[in-house]
Amino acid sequence: GCSGDTEGSDGTENIELNVASWATPDSLSEEMAEWWYTEIEERTDGRVTFNIDAADSLCSASEIPECVRDGRADVGQTLTDYSTQLFPMASISSIPFLSPGSEPVAKAIHDLSTEHEGAAALWEENNLHPIAHVPPGRLLLGGDTELSSVDHLDGLRLRMAGQYAQEAVDAAGANSVVLTAPETYEGIERGLADAAGFPLDGTVAYQLKDILPEWTDPGIGTYTTIGMWMNSDVYSELPDDIRSVVDEVTEEYNSEHAHRIFNEITTMQCDLLLDTIGELNQWEDDESQRWEDSIEADLEERWVEGAESDGLTDAAGYLEAYKSKLDEYSGDMEADPSLACAERG
Amino acid sequence: MVAKPKTFEDILRTSVEKMAVPLGALSSLSTIVMMVAISIDVVARNTAGEPIPGLLELSEMALVATVFLGIAYAGTTNAHVSVDLLTSKLPTKSRRMIAGLMWLLGSGMIVWFIMSTFDRAIQSTEMSEVTLGLVVWPIWPARWLIVIGYVAFLIVALANAYLSFRNEPLLGEDEDALANDEAQDSSSTGQHVIAPEVDGTEKKS
Amino acid sequence: MSSGLAVLLVAGVLIALLLLKMPVWLALAISGGIGLWVLRDEAFVGSTLATASYEETSTFSLTIIPMFILLGVFAVRAKVAEQVFTIARRAFTKIPGGIGIATVAACAGFAAVSGSSIGTAATMSRLSVGEMRKAGYPASMAGALVAVAGTLGAMIPPSLFLVLYAILANVSIAQMLAAGIVPGTLSAVIYATYILIRTRKYSKVSSNGSALAQEIDVEIEKSQGRQQATGLPYRGLFRLGIIFAIIMGGIYSGLFTPTESAAIGALAALVILVLEFKTNGVREIARQFVGALTETAKTSTMVFAVIVGSSILSTFFVVARVPQTISNSVTSLDIPDWAIMALLLVFLIPLGMALESISILVITVPLIYPVAMDMGFDGIWLGVMIIKLIEIGMVTPPVGINVFVVAGTARLPSIEVFKGVWPFVVLEILLLVGFFIFPDVVLWLPSLVQ
Ligand code: NA
Ligand code: NA
């Protein structure tokens, strides 16, 4: 539970929440979450404070959901890819060619966490109160040579990301090379892999733009989300007024600020990328379609089966609802910053 | 040791070793599984152009098996490193009393390890915890290997505590001198008798 | 209980348990566990115990440790080490430090293929400590040399350590990798120089030493009768060269990763073991093979138990916010910038004693880097300093993981190894002072990389 409950000078309770985060300083994840922490601290007049441990120190990135569930941390933030069976509701975003961009995906998952009964029940059962699930961006491909069609991928040794990425890699005739994000730089440098899949954020954070000169958006869309949760017990035991501040900030975060910050940072990273490599390319629609069509497995069906076995009741209904939410939100919003970047360069 | 009637302590030693040695053998087997799996993966990637799904995950599990199936065996051969600064200057009897207390305290800690890893193994099994790479790989078997390893080590720790309180050497402690000699004379031929401590004794492995 | 009091309690318990000969990994786990229990609760400790046990042993990159140990054990059983060091002894007949220098060179070579200090130390202690002792080196010096030279693994690229620092500090990875080369090589040269001076003084002082040298020559003469042509077992050197060539060639041509190289190297060493014993029959080969596996399993278990224990203690230091407290109190001191910087860096040594090294990097870089930037220090230079200091922490008491690994692997009393470490630590600190005064020593090579 909250470890630092102390009586404030005016008799009200002061709450210190421990945060386990995978975010390194100045990263996209940190900048986004920082808004949420600060707003809550300010709107509760400092009655709630956050004690944020350095990335990977209290709980490793893959262990963070577990740390939040068992109460070692009160709040956590990490990639949902690390423990997919807890997050079928978010891993839906890794189905290739389904999810266009960060904002519609984040909003859809946020809405469905309460609107879809199965999802709400599973969050509760996992003892996680969801705060936000924001994809780190559309998946880009970087290589030494131009990668503008499926044929260019044939035979390439490709470092990919995402739960269903293997299917897409296979379908394109490329070979998967398993490298963690920090290992990728040295792996590419030595020729272990020819190309890599990363969001725009990764091209800068892992300095891949410095060794891979050709970057392109192949139309796969998002491939995972950065999830943020609070321990359910901690959340429900918050004093009413504080809980309503948390809810209010969380709502504003999901409806506006997460995306505003995401867009700002991604646009900045776009500048850095374009400064280094000149332009970010984008696949023709037919070419993306050709890649999508070449994937033989029915990944939506596979997601439904997996999600059901992970405890999400009515997973098929979730998928349908997710798709219509994406349609709804994609219509009236500005282009995803990765696409905007490709338009610029 | 000369032939004399078997005491309870002798039987205890033998039984604990009988439990730990097969686990140690499995631990050894795991290191070779790791070597072969990683090598095959490298060869497959460079010839067929594709890694073999699951070998990476297999290697990770083999590492868990190497460590935790070997932990009791390392215990019976007194291979866990410790700092001998103060106790070496004490008379044997007091040294063994302290060793008994330490192993008793250590046993308590191991019980804590067992309880928490057991809970985690149950939880992992119930939710059929997996990792996702090129292949979906179950995590729960590795979690149970940890529990098995700690339980076996608890038996070693308790036996060590008992033996120490009975003023007997720890499991594997007699072998230390021999093992040390082998380390000096890392050639198994024993021909290069140079350093005074070396006597070329071959320790059976 | 306040964090400060908890830290004192934990330090007291740890030192008491170590002195009373509690196995090191249990001493680390118990003291860390008590600290977490005092600051949080039983549930927190339970989760930490379960997490540390699994996370520290189920990571692919850590397979490098048992694989390098296996490589070392195979190579020793195939008599490669003995043969190589016989040659080294001969080659350096006029220089008593020959074997020590050969060891440093081999550590630097391993460092150029592996990013793991612990892996390098474990392999080299199996390969060279026995040979050094045969040549008359005291246990303390032989063990300490390997423990210290093992730390080159993180400084000489490839090194995930350098890459992680670059990512955390947002400096150029390419420059950071280049920046490790000169300090790493310079450290190796300094260790070798020290060995040269120390062992020379040694043979002058002790007549026993020169008697030993004579004995070595007698041995070499004797072995000449058995060896072909020049009388020296050059096949050992050739075989070691093959193993290195396979590993180096594979890594630098992109055939496999540094992590995978350890398994390939072990496989190559196995082939050499089979060649060495092929005339002795299948049974002897099988006996050597099984013996090597058992030894590897035992050593690997010992090493990983210490890593698990250290990760538990490390979690305590994070929860007690020790790094933040130190950093805040140092930066608030009213002293010149360079002195603040020096103090911050010096505090990395005691932190390195308790925190496992990747954690300490992730925790301290965000604390120290902004301060250093404000003061106008160079980010690349800072990375070299931080990594060097963390590595010093890995060989200093009470908890120096490399020392425990060497002591456990070579079956030396850890206290002896710790004793032998001090002169090296002094040298390391002198080297760091040099880098502090002349940062260009570190920075000229990366400045060529753009
Ligand atoms: Na290295
Ligand atoms: Na240390």
Image (cartoon, coloured by chain):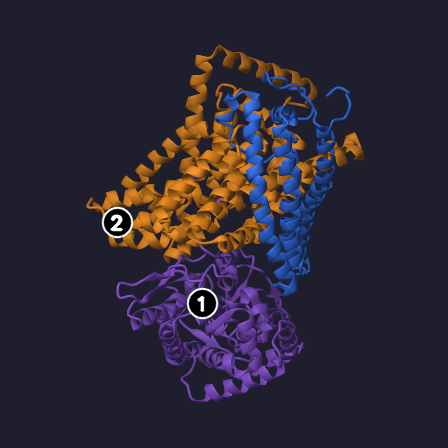
Q: Indicate the secondary structure of the residue bearing disc 1.
A: helix
Q: Residue at x 48, y 69 (%)?
A: A232
* Chain colored blue: B
Rendering coords of residue C251 (x, y %): 56, 49
Left or right side of A30 for B163: right
The type of residue carrying mark 1 is: Val
Measure the C-alpha gap from mark 2 to mark 1: 35 Å
The type of residue carrying mark 2 is: Thr
* Label number found at residue A234: 1
Colour of chain A in the image? purple
The answer to whether mark 2 and mark 1 are in CB contact below 8 A is: no
Left or right side of A173 for A10: left
Rendering coords of residue C255 (x, y %): 60, 53
**Residue A299 drawn above or below residue C177:** below
Q: Nearest the camera: B165 or B39?
A: B165
Identify the image quadrant of the C terminus of chain B. Answer: top right
Res C399 visible: no
Closer mark to the observer between disc 2 and disc 1? 1
* Chain colored orange: C
Left or right side of C11 for B157: right
User: What residue is disc 2 on?
Assistant: C331
Total residue callouts: 2
